[in-house]
């Protein structure tokens, strides 16, 4: 008998419909290769957080390409497993891991999980329904029961979610240039995000909080640039006992581990004040 979660996922997928999914045969082939990992008994025995790292590593060296979701016309669910940026990498890995937990780990199930991750409340309406601000992404996924915001309980600094970058820079977004009416929608959403009550771990506290972070946790870099919330994201990964990041990197333009422990790595980055941490929930 199908689980309630499976029924909910497939209902979400059917509501979206095949015509709203954009993918290629190569994307399906990549997912079929991941299914071999899902069937491995050693993988099946792993806790969920280690499955996240296993699938995250399966994307190792995948090229970093920005703006892969910015297509002309109406908003559709784009599945591009061939090229990733930091956010799409997190989304694809998470969607694949969650699909692997299902009885039927097929491409359509993964796409349904992806839609529920990428869009506010899991519903694709228009361009503004996509979660463009990553603090909003994390808060929405917590509301939907996908993650727990660990940094809210262990963080040592209040998060300032006063975002306004998108509505104040519509010229940078082709969809907003095409449809100026969306600008007011984004301004309204930004005001709602500004009311979020969240915390983060300051850069100087990362090492002391390390024992409360797990492999596979979601890590988001908190930006102190006015109007922005998060500048980068990836997955926590302990290497030789030190917290590092597995991410789609602009340093090498590929998926890689940070060459330094995370606390040292962000010291070399301008305008990064600390990290938010989310934990994907066991299903």
Image: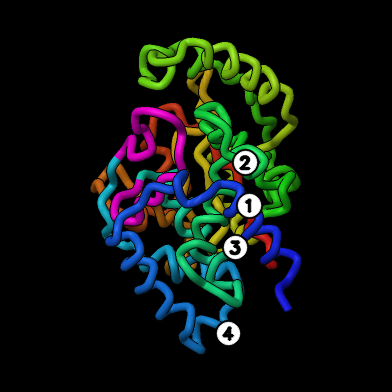
Number of the label disc, if any, that sits on residue 45 = 4
The image shows residue 128 at horizontal and vertical percentages of 55, 27
Q: Nearer the viewer, mark 2 or mark 3?
A: 2
Name the residue carrying label 2: 123
Alpha carbon separation for disc pair 3 and 4: 17 Å
Side of 151 relative to 232 (left or right): right
The front one of 22 and 245 is 22
Q: Secondary structure at mark 3?
A: loop
Q: Nearer the viewer, mark 2 or mark 4?
A: 2
Alpha carbon separation for disc pair 3 and 1: 30 Å
Number of the label disc, if any, that sits on residue 214 = 3
Alpha carbon separation for disc pair 2 and 4: 32 Å
Residue in the image at 28% along x and 46% along y: 64
Side of 67 relative to 179 (left or right): left
Residue in the image at 38% along x and 38% along y: 69
**2 or 3: tag closer to the N-terminus:** 2
């Amino acid at each position: 008998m199908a689980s309630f979660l499976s029924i909910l996922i497939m209902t979400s997928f059917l509501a979206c419909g095949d015509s709203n999914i954009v993918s290629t045969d190569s994307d399906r082939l990549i997912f079929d290769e991941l299914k071999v990992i899902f069937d491995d008994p050693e993988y099946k025995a792993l806790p969920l957080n280690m499955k996240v790292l296993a699938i995250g590593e399966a994307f190792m060296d995948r090229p970093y390409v920005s703006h892969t979701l910015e297509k002309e016309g109406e908003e559709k669910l784009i599945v591009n497993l061939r090229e990733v940026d930091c956010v799409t990498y997190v989304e694809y890995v998470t969607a694949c891991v969650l699909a692997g937990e299902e009885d039927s780990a097929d491409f359509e199930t993964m796409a349904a999980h992806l839609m529920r991750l990428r869009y506010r409340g899991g519903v694709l309406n228009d361009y503004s329904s996509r979660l463009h601000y990553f603090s909003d992404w994390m808060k929405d996924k917590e509301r939907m029961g996908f993650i727990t915001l660990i940094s809210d309980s262990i963080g040592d600094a209040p998060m300032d979610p006063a975002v306004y970058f998108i509505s104040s820079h519509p010229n940078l977004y082709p969809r907003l240039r095409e449809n100026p009416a969306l600008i007011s929608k984004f301004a309204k959403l930004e005001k709602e995000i500004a009311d979020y009550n969240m915390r983060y771990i300051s850069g100087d506290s990362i090492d002391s909080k390390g024992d409360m972070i797990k492999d596979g946790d979601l890590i988001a870099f908190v930006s102190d640039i006015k109007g922005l919330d998060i500048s980068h994201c990836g997955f926590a990964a302990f290497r030789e006992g030190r917290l590092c990041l597995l991410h789609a990197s602009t340093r090498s333009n590929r998926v890689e581990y940070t060459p330094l422990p995370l606390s040292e790595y962000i010291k070399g980055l301008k305008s990064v004040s600390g990290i938010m941490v989310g934990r994907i929930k066991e299903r």
